[in-house]
Image: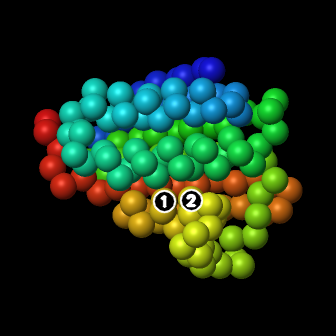
Amino acid sequence: MTKKQAPARTRGPREVGFSMRIPSRAQFGKRARDEVVSFALANRIAHAELDEFTFAVGEALANAIEHSGTGDVIEVHCRIESDKIVATITDSGCGFNPQTGRPFPEVLSERGRGLPIMERCTDIFAVRSAPGKGTAVVLGRYLQRKNS
């Protein structure tokens, strides 16, 4: 697992971030999610503002791990801008066609809830994917209050 802290930008609004690469295994997904939370808390974002965002990040990591090969690497990028936190989770897994739509699954279904849940837990949601090309999920949450 590697992590790289990005320097603060000098132009435009304040933006800080980090990147990390993790093996496609469940225990590393939890570590990556915990790193996102630690990064946000270190930048004075309240726990209350992170709950749904963290849940969505966990779902994106679980999907990336499930649909990637054992030897694959998942990239996690997280940044905080003046009014939002944004995470991008990228894998080189099997991919899919996002144009086919994402109907919410049947009530008793145990699969297919990840993307709809991610979308409902975030203010910013985008998926870039193609069959055989992997997937990138962008998740963002506008911050109600950010302590300086």
Circles 2 and 1: CB atoms closer than 8 Å? yes
Residue named by callout 1: 118
Q: CA distance from mark 2 to mark 1?
A: 6 Å
- Amino acid type for the residue under numbered disc 2: Gly
At 46% across and 52% down in the image, what residue appears?
A: 56
Question: Which disc number belongs to residue 114?
Answer: 2
At 46% across and 24% down in the image, what residue appears?
A: 5
Which quadrant does the N terminus fall into?
A: top right
- Give the side of residue 36 with respect to residue 144, left or right: right
Q: Viewer-proximal residue, 121 or 17?
A: 121
- Answer yes or no: is residue 87 visible: yes
Q: Residues within 10 Å of mark 2 (few under 14, many from 20)?
A: some
Image height check: is 17 above or below 90? above
- Amino acid type for the residue under numbered disc 1: Met
Q: Quadrant of residue 70?
A: top right
Under circle 1, the secondary element is: helix
- Give the side of residue 52 with respect to residue 49, left or right: right
What colour scheme does the image use? Answer: rainbow
Q: Viewer-proximal residue, 75 or 53?
A: 53
Q: Residues within 10 Å of mark 1 (few under 14, many from 20)?
A: many
At 40% across and 45% down in the image, what residue appears?
A: 54
Residue 77 placed where, x, y %?
A: 53, 39
Residue 45 placed where, x, y %?
A: 23, 39
